[in-house]
Amino acid sequence: NHAFPPVWASAIPEVPDGARRHDVANKQLADWVVRIALLTRPDEVVWCDGSDEEWNRLTTEMTDAGSLVRLDPGVHPDSFLARSDPDDVARMEDRTFICSRSEADAGPTNNWRDPADMHTELNALFAESMRGRTMYVVPYSMGPVGGAISQVGVQITDSPYAVISLSIMTRMGDDALAVIGPDTDWVAGVHSVGYPLRDRDGLRRDDVPWPSNPVKYVSHFPEERAIWSFGSGYGGNALLPKKCFALRIASVMARDEGWLAEHMLLLKLTSPAGRAFHIAAAFPSACGKTNLAMLRPTIPGWDVETIGDDIAWLRPGDDGRLHAINPEAGFFGVAPGTSVQNNPVAIDTMRKHTIFTNVALTEDGEVWWEGKTDEPPAHLIDWRGQYWTPASGTPAAHPNARFTAPIEQCRTLADDWYEADGVPIDAIVFGGRRASNVPLVVDTGDWEHGVFVGATVSSERTAAQEGRVGELRRDPFGMLPFVGYDMGDYWQHWLDVGAALGSGAPKIFQVNWFRQDEEGAFLWPGFGENSRVLAWIAGRVSGEAEAVDTAIGEVPAPGSLDVTGLGLGATVLQSLLDVDPVAWLEECDRTEEFFARFGDRVPGRLRDELARLRERLAGA
Ligand code: SAT
Ligand code: MN
């Protein structure tokens, strides 16, 4: 039951005609739209159908209004550039709230606010916040429409940028609305950029290319299955089905119902013998999930196909195995660093029908970002819309600049993406960005040790979140900003899911592509060469690849990781796989401090894992 806000006191009890839809089967949904319209007072209400006509109309309106730039149709047909407000360029973790009834339920990693207090505050902010604007009602399905693992939601927004982005990122429109029956559960999302064009007295102000509000909230109500987001138009803050629903709210649903909602890419790996392996891999934001999902193997006979690059929903199936879907329908990928050399698939995917945000523009209407070509063009328009030359001394594209492109444009898309019941998972991989300590690849041996590794993953901070880039932070399961309840309970939930799966559980691995030598040079070439690591992981699943034991798990036995042709010296390979007991005992101390933050909600089994790890290191 969604807690409906009270109708704004000064509001005239009339809503635009479009708000009332008597043909909507779900009465609660029909009602909710009217109530939000009464609260926010838009000029117009539009139910989005997900049609091409709708895309064309909105992109044309936005281009005319100056909030999108149409790219050269000869190079990027049907593609657009959006430049955000310079203060609205990333997720804002300090403005993100989990408003569970009990504070303890949000746990120490989330900001908590009392749900009633938060609703009061939000109602005041949303009151008349859409004056002068159109309110869009966007029904969508996460996962194949009507699929066994799929869920539906509806986002209300006054941002046409959010609407066109959702039309790429989700299965949006009439088909999704049609599956919301009288008793269907749906997740409610209310979003406003908080920039009304008229005030209550009828005074007008002009629109700006990227409307937003200095006051920002991304608030989740897990018990209501509702999200309210105010003041930001950027990605994860504004596209509510993505991190807000598919991770924060869905993680709570998953806890209640015995499944997993994870920050994971999904890929299908096929061996030269034709055996298929499905791999789910969790990495923090901006650590290369998109590149791994689109990887082109460098080793002969192996193939990788893409299923998802950011989010996976995994459910134990009747066959006792874990089945996964990608709930999304598009990529919201980091552009900087992406080139024809290192990710030709991504470059090809964003060739047409793509929204670029905060990239630079060349004088021929093409896009550019750092790392796209070795040499920057002589002059550009940078992400702020300013004239730029290499001498400007600032990045031309924002480091968190993004491309939004339909997954069906990806030429390595696996047919499995369409599987309504998901694919059975063979291996789960945890990774992060670590200059030292963590080997290239480790087989964790069993589920409980794997969960310990996932829970204690740390990574260097990237541009995807606000804060100091490069600083080491613990990012359990790559989910630190995305678990919608207590982190310790989340770890326990992982242990419970594994116990229920028993011998059907996938094997768990840890990887690190980012290990460096003393001079700070990367030891491993990464990108397509990561296929060698995937092949070893597949070999462990099939029982064909040899491993040697270390204190932290099993690493490739000499000769079992195919490094032919890489020209890696024996010492480099050794450094890549090295486990330094002294450094790892220090990591254990850090882990103990980290666990202390969660008090008695850390599962005893994870404490046991830490104790056993220390024993093995002491004996090493
Ligand atoms: O803005 S998003 O949260 O969708 C991108 C990311 O941080 O992974
Ligand atoms: Mn992500």
Image (spheres, rainbow, N blue to C red):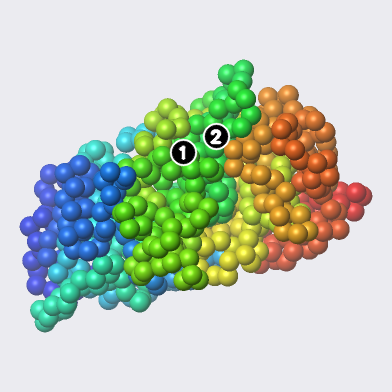
Is residue 398 at all visible to an observer of this figure? yes
Question: Can residue 254 be seen from the camera position used here?
Answer: no
Q: Is mark 2 on a helix, strand or loop?
A: loop
Give the Cα separation between the discs numbered 1 and 2.
8 Å
> What residue occupies the far front of the structure in this picture?
378
> Is the Cβ of the residue at disc 1 closer than 8 Å to that at disc 2?
yes
Residue 252 is situated, as x and y percent measured from the top left of the image, at: 47, 52
Report whether 26 appears left or right of 166. left
Mark 1 packing: few (<14 Cα in 10 Å), some, or many (20+)?
many
> Could you tell me residue 451's position as x and y percent?
66, 47
Image quarter (top left, top right, bottom left or bottom right) of the N terminus: bottom left
Q: In this view, does 281 lie above or below 489?
A: above
Q: Mark 2 points at which residue?
A: 296
Residue 240 relative to residue 566: left or right: left
Q: Earlier in the sequence, mark 1 or mark 2?
A: 2
**Who's the residue at 82% across and 59% down the image?**
583
Q: Residue furthest right?
A: 619
